[in-house]
Image (cartoon, helix red, strand yellow):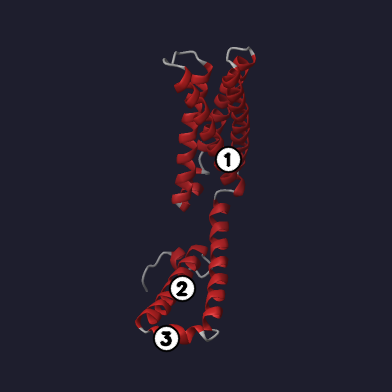
């Protein structure tokens, strides 16, 4: 007997079920399209029957079930939908922060002087935007990555550091804004960025707690 890996022939593997569903309906849809293209009369005759209705309904049901099972499979391996949700929201808000601060830095500062709170905030936002995107993208591209990383202490350390540095950068920028250093347009924009930064730091805190629970479970 051939030494086939277990996950490729196990009947209840969501990945195999999704692959089989995709392959079967790809072949069937290709045959249906080819028969209609080769002989136009075939398409007209088939459209007069209930075949296409039943076929597409069955295809929709099977594809929906396979997609839900596959999604549930890799979300479970990444210890829940909260993982994906927190990281996605953190990436979106982080990108907004980078856009706001970089725009006004480019517009109102000819030289990025060291010690500027907005520059420190921008550096933290860019660093953790890239780091979080790479982390989430790795888990999306490779289904086994999330399970492997969750067994290490990397995520706990990463999210803890991200929480602390993002929170410090946001508080420093917020204090600098409230001290009246900036004019009205800059003040409103940097105030919004600092508040969003505090929200992102809270997301990293929640992610660190999830990572700790997952790490302690192994």
Number of the front mark, 3 or 1: 3
Frontmost residue, 100 versus 207:
100
Residue behind mark 2:
25
- SS at mark 3 in the image: helix
* Badge 1: residue crowd in 10 Å (few <14, some 14–19, many ≥20): some
Number of the front mark, 2 or 3: 3
User: Label 2 vs label 1: CA separation?
Assistant: 35 Å
Frontmost residue, 128 versus 4:
128
Picture coordinates of residue 119 (x, y %)? 49, 20
First reached walking from the N terminus: tag 2 or tag 3? 2
Dots 2, 3 in contact, CB < 8 A: no
Badge number at residue 3: none
Q: Does residue 193 lie above or below 61 as drawn?
A: above
- SS at mark 2 in the image: helix
Picture coordinates of residue 46 (x, y %)? 48, 85
Frontmost residue, 132 versus 9:
132
């Amino acid at each position: 007997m051939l030494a086939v890996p277990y996950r490729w022939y196990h009947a209840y593997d969501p990945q195999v079920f999704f692959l089989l569903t995709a392959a079967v309906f790809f072949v069937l849809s290709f045959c249906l399209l080819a028969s209609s293209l080769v002989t136009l009369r075939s398409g007209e005759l088939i459209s007069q029957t209930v075949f296409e209705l039943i076929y597409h309904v069955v295809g929709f049901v099977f594809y929906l079930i396979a997609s839900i099972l596959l999604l549930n499979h890799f979300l479970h391996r990444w210890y829940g939908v909260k993982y994906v949700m927190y990281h996605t929201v953190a990436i979106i808000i982080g990108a907004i922060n980078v856009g706001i601060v970089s725009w006004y830095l480019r517009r109102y500062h000819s030289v990025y002087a060291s010690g500027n709170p907005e520059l420190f905030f921008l550096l933290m936002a860019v660093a953790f935007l890239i780091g979080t995107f790479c982390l989430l993208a790795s888990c999306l591209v490779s289904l086994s990555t999330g399970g492997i990383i969750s067994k290490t202490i990397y995520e706990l350390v990463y999210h803890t550091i991200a929480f602390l540095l993002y929170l410090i950068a946001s508080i420093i920028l917020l204090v600098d804004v409230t001290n009246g250093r900036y004019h009205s347009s800059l003040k409103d924009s940097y105030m919004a960025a600092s508040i969003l930064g505090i929200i992102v730091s809270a997301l990293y805190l929640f992610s660190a707690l999830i990572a700790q629970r997952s790490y302690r479970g192994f």
